[in-house]
Image (cartoon, helix red, strand yellow):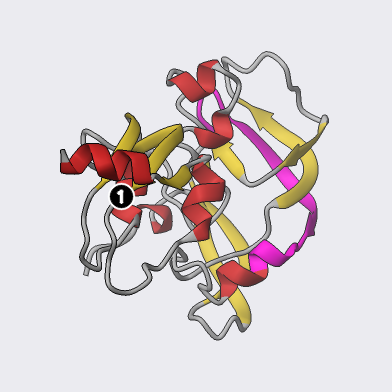
Amino acid sequence: MAVPPEMEHPRKAFGWTARDTSGVLSPFKFSRRETGEKDVAFKVLYCAICHSDLHMLKNEWGISTYPLVPGHEIAGEVTEVGSKVRNFKVGDKVGVGCMVLSCRSCQSCEDNLENYCPKMIVTYSGKYVDGTTTYGGAAMGTLDGIIDTVSAIHPLPPLLGMLKSQGKLVMVGLPEKPLELPIFPLLAGGKIIAGSLEELRRHKK
């Protein structure tokens, strides 16, 4: 059985993890990679838990991976900085929110909207750059709009995944039953869903 990259890192760590959708936490030993040239390492002094952590513990949004160490409202003290870090030094008090990295080169990052970056790495239940790739597909996060003409039952997440931030999915098909609407991709990606009878008439011409 292959060993996950995060278990082969040299720095040992300890946390409390959920191992399944029961949400029950238990002691968990894991490891961290060495501090990179653009990284800031810090000792966690405090960590709050918000209701989103509870959703993630029980996989109520359908995106959790286990084992899962929750907590994304973190405060601590810097213990090490990489060689290219300029704005932090050892001893500084720092905080971390729900994301730890973005690409800094896409349109969202250039607009200071890194929380919509398609390569954003979340604080937990995600994959870092030295692990497996989180997203795939050349069209992911690149389209301004999609007109959905499908009149059969079909999943919406693949279409939402192709939209970039503020992209719009216009529904003109009329399935015989209501479609499931995943809320998390809308909020996390800044996506918009709309319906249009005008587009439907144009499509039929």
Image mark count: 1
**Residue closer to the observer: 177 or 119:** 177
The relative height of residue 73 versus residue 129 in the rendered view (above or below) is: below
Return the residue at label 1. Answer: 172
Q: Amino acid at mark 1?
A: Val
**Residue closer to the observer: 106 or 18:** 106
* Disc 1: CA contacts within 10 A as few (<14), some (14-19) or many (>=20): many
| Quadrant that contains the C terminus | top left
| Residue 172, position as x, y percentages in the image | 30, 49
Residue at 51% x, 81% y: name it. 21
Residue at 60% x, 21% y: name it. 112
Residue at 75% x, 22% y: name it. 89
The relative height of residue 129 versus residue 184 in the rendered view (above or below) is: above
| Residue 157, position as x, y percentages in the image | 35, 55
Is residue 50 shown in magenta? Answer: yes
23 left or right, relative to 89: left
**Residue closer to the observer: 197 or 143:** 197
Residue 130 seen in the current view: no
Is residue 46 shown in magenta? Answer: yes
Residue 182 seen in the current view: yes
130 left or right, relative to 152: right
| Residue 115, position as x, y percentages in the image | 57, 36
Mark 1 falls on what kind of element? loop
Q: Which residues are magenta?
A: 35-53
Residue at 20% x, 40% y: name it. 203
| Residue 95, position as x, y percentages in the image | 76, 40
